[in-house]
Amino acid sequence: MAAVTTTMETGDTQSPATVRVWDPLVRIFHWSLVGLFSFAFLTGDEWQVPHETAGYIIAGLIAFRVLWGLVGSRHARFSSFIYGPSTVAGFVADTVRLKAHRYLGHNPAGGLMVLGLLLANSVISLSGWMMTTDAYWGVKWVGELHEGAAFAALGLVALHIGGVVLASFEHGENLVCAMFTGKKRAAGPDDIA
C-alpha cells in the first residue's frame, strides 16, 4: 500500500502526517530488552557473571514495563492494547486474509505478544535467580524451566518478528522504523486509534 501524500494549495506535496505513538521509555525498554535477551541467550552458561547481570537488568526492565503499562503514556498502557480472546482470534483471522484493521498502537495480536514476552522473560528471570540460591541451586526442574522458558521466548520472538513483517506489509508502513522514531502514520478513517 503506497503512502498517501497531500497537496497544499501552492501545489507542493508533503509527507503524510505522522503522530508520536511510542514514547521514549517504551522504545528504550524495547530495544534494551532485545539486546539483553540476545546477549543472555547467547552467553548461557558460557559467561556466567555477565549472563546473570543481563538477567537482573531484564528483571528490572520487566518491573518498569509493568509499572509503565499501568501509568504510562496512552499507547504504553495495558488498557489500550489488551483485548479479549475473540477479538484476538478475529484479528488473526483477518490478518491471514490480509484484511485486518490497522491499529495506531498495538493491535490485538501485538498486545497478546507483549504479555507473552513479559511472562516468558519473567519466568526466565525468576528461574535464573532461583538457580543462584541455596534452596534451588542444582535442582533439575528449575534449570529445565529456565532453559525451556528461554526457548519459548525465542519462539515468541520469531512470531513477533513475523507479525511485524506481515503488518508492515499489510498496512504499508515500517513498524521497525516506528519503534526507533516513535512515530507512525496518522490514523486514517478505517484505522483504530
Image (cartoon, helix red, strand yellow):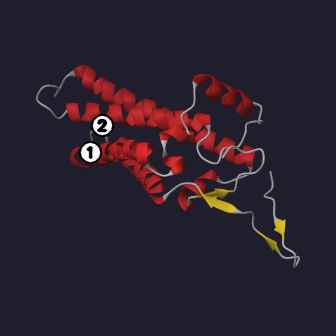
Q: Is residue 54 left or right of residue 15?
A: left
Asked which secondary structure carries label 2, the reply is helix
Residue marked by disc 2: 125
From what the image shows, is residue 93 above or below residue 167? above
From what the image shows, is residue 131 above or below residue 179? above
Foreground residue, 105 or 150? 105
Provide residue 139's location: percent of width, then percent of height.
19, 22
- Residue at 84 percent of width and 73 percent of height: 8
Provide residue 21's location: percent of width, then percent of height.
58, 54
Provide residue 33's location: percent of width, then percent of height.
41, 48
Provide residue 94's location: percent of width, then percent of height.
73, 31
Mark yes or no: residue 158 visible: no
Q: Is residue 134 left or right of residue 43?
A: left
The type of residue carrying mark 1 is Tyr
Asked which secondary structure carries label 1, the reply is helix
From what the image shows, is residue 56 above or below residue 154? below
| Sooner in the amino-acid sequence: mark 2 or mark 1 | 1
- Residue at 56 percent of width and 62 percent of height: 181
The type of residue carrying mark 2 is Ser
Quarter of image, res 180: bottom right
Mark yes or no: residue 18 visible: yes
Category of crowding for the residue at label 2, using alpha-carbon neighbours closer than 10 angstroms: few (below 14), some (14–19), many (at least 20): many
Quarter of image, res 184: bottom right
Asked if marks 2 and 1 touch (Cβ < 8 Å), the reply is yes
- Specify the farthest residue to the top: 141
Residue marked by disc 1: 56
- Whole-angstrom CA distance, mark 2 to mark 1, is 7 Å
Exactly how many numbered labels are in the figure? Answer: 2
Category of crowding for the residue at label 1, using alpha-carbon neighbours closer than 10 angstroms: few (below 14), some (14–19), many (at least 20): some
- Residue at 27 percent of width and 30 percent of height: 127
